[in-house]
Amino acid sequence: MSFDLNALLRDNIKNLVPYSSARDEFKGEASVFLDANENAFGSPLQHDYNRYPDPLQHQVKHKLSKIKGVPAEHMFLGNGSDEAIDILYRAFCSPKIDNVVLVPPTYGMYEVSANINDVQVRKVNLTEDFQLNLDGIAEALDMHTKIIFICSPNNPTGNSINPLDIETLLINFPGIVVVDEAYINYSKQKSFTYSLPEFPNLVVLQTLSKAWGLAALRLGLAFASKEIIEVFNKIKPPYNINQATQDLVLEALDNYEVVNEWIRETIQERENLVNKLQELQQVERITPSDANFVLVKLQDPRGLYDNLVNQGIIVRDRSKVALCEGCLRITIGTRLENERLLTQIQEYYKSI
Ligand SMILES: *Cc1c(COP(=O)(O)O)cnc(C)c1O
């Protein structure tokens, strides 16, 4: 396999002259900034938000780089992972011509983003044990296949995808292989960020929305070669990460100890919930999870779902999703929340 980034990019992106902002054109120190039509008087807030933020978020990347062990030039920050997913389509996939391969059951946003960008989706279901069907994927590929999206640990199944299978794709597929690691903090698997030097076609996605507890701030991360990151930066809106988010993330990244503690607790609670659920005869299967949720196959999923909703407990009904028939996806909560959930499940099954 020879990887040729230029051959993979859409022509309009290859030839794109990006927007040059006031902050791009003057980067030095100065005391009078009259170049960006900002309000020089200030902002009606305690904190000054009258100046445009750093388009490339240098400070945040510097801190993240130390935590993740990946140099800042290999890092893109997006307004949630959703922005990184959308940019991948806009960079590589010509509408109505190119296609991508998805491996259901998986995260729904890959398909929605394909539809928004008018890009064909080819689906190759995971196997019964929620692993890649490599032969099926090989058959689905053609010269217009630009991206394969893999989610590991996978949402909604919770299991990790065999890393050797992902490597097989990385070695043999000349397009982009995306490994979405939104739940990597809960997993025993090694992150694919460590494989970046080996694979020029690898893009790893992570997020601060899950283990880091910052879903409301919208910060997604993409890791890739410098060349791919340059393409991302060319396409993104100039100020895609607002100053309030940059300020708060900088502060949050210092508090990794509490985050690590929550990860340990979540895993403990997950094992506890799995053990208790397994005692119920109505529970048919629990997929071994490397994430902060479990996919549970059980009797009468819809009836149980409605009953839980009536009690103010919301889980995700995945029973209509391919290979997830009869399944609910349950996020791991606090000990109290998990106990309330268990009690209600037990009561429901006693009542029917
Ligand atoms: C939750 C989740 C994300 C996070 O998306 P953000 O836009 O960063 O909040 C990404 N991928 C998967 C598979 C997820 O489950």
Image: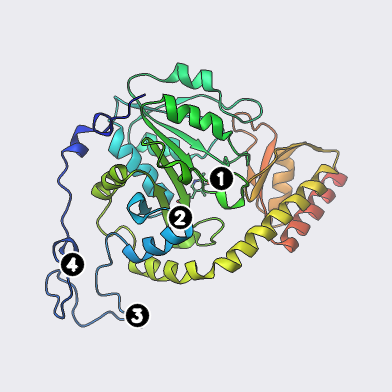
What residue lies at 72% left-to-right and 51% top-to-bottom? 270
Give residue 259's position: percent from left, percent from top: 58, 64
Looking at the image, which is closer to me, 315 or 306? 315
What residue lies at 28% left-to-right and 79% top-to-bottom? 43
Give residue 7's position: percent from left, percent from top: 25, 29
What residue lies at 19% left-to-right and 37% top-to-bottom? 14
Q: Which mark is residue 27?
A: 4
Give residue 198's position: percent from left, percent from top: 41, 37
Tell which tag, 4 or 1, sits nearer the viewer: 1
Where is mark 3, residue-wise? 47
Where is mark 2, residue-wise? 69
Q: Going from the N terminus, do you reach mark 3 or mark 4 first?
A: 4
The CA span between labels 3 and 1 is 39 Å
When asked about the image quadrant of residue 100, the answer is top left
Looking at the image, which is closer to me, 163 or 16? 163
Q: Which mark is residue 67?
A: none
Q: Is residue 11 visible?
A: yes
Would you call the spot at circle 4 few (<14 residues within 10 Å), some (14-19), or many (20 or more)? few
Task: Indicate the secondary structure of the residue bearing disc 3.
Answer: loop
The CA span between labels 1 and 2 is 13 Å
Mark 1 belongs to which amino acid? Answer: Lys
Mark 2 belongs to which amino acid? Answer: Gly
Image side of residue 231 versus residue 46, left or right: left
Q: Going from the N terminus, do you reach mark 3 or mark 1 first?
A: 3
Mark 3 belongs to which amino acid? Answer: His
Q: Is mark 2 within 8 Å of ligand 1?
A: no
Q: Are marks 4 and 1 in contact (CB under 8 Å)?
A: no
Would you call the spot at circle 3 few (<14 residues within 10 Å), some (14-19), or many (20 or more)? few
Tell which tag, 2 or 3, sits nearer the viewer: 2
Where is mark 1, residue-wise? 190
The CA span between labels 2 and 3 is 31 Å
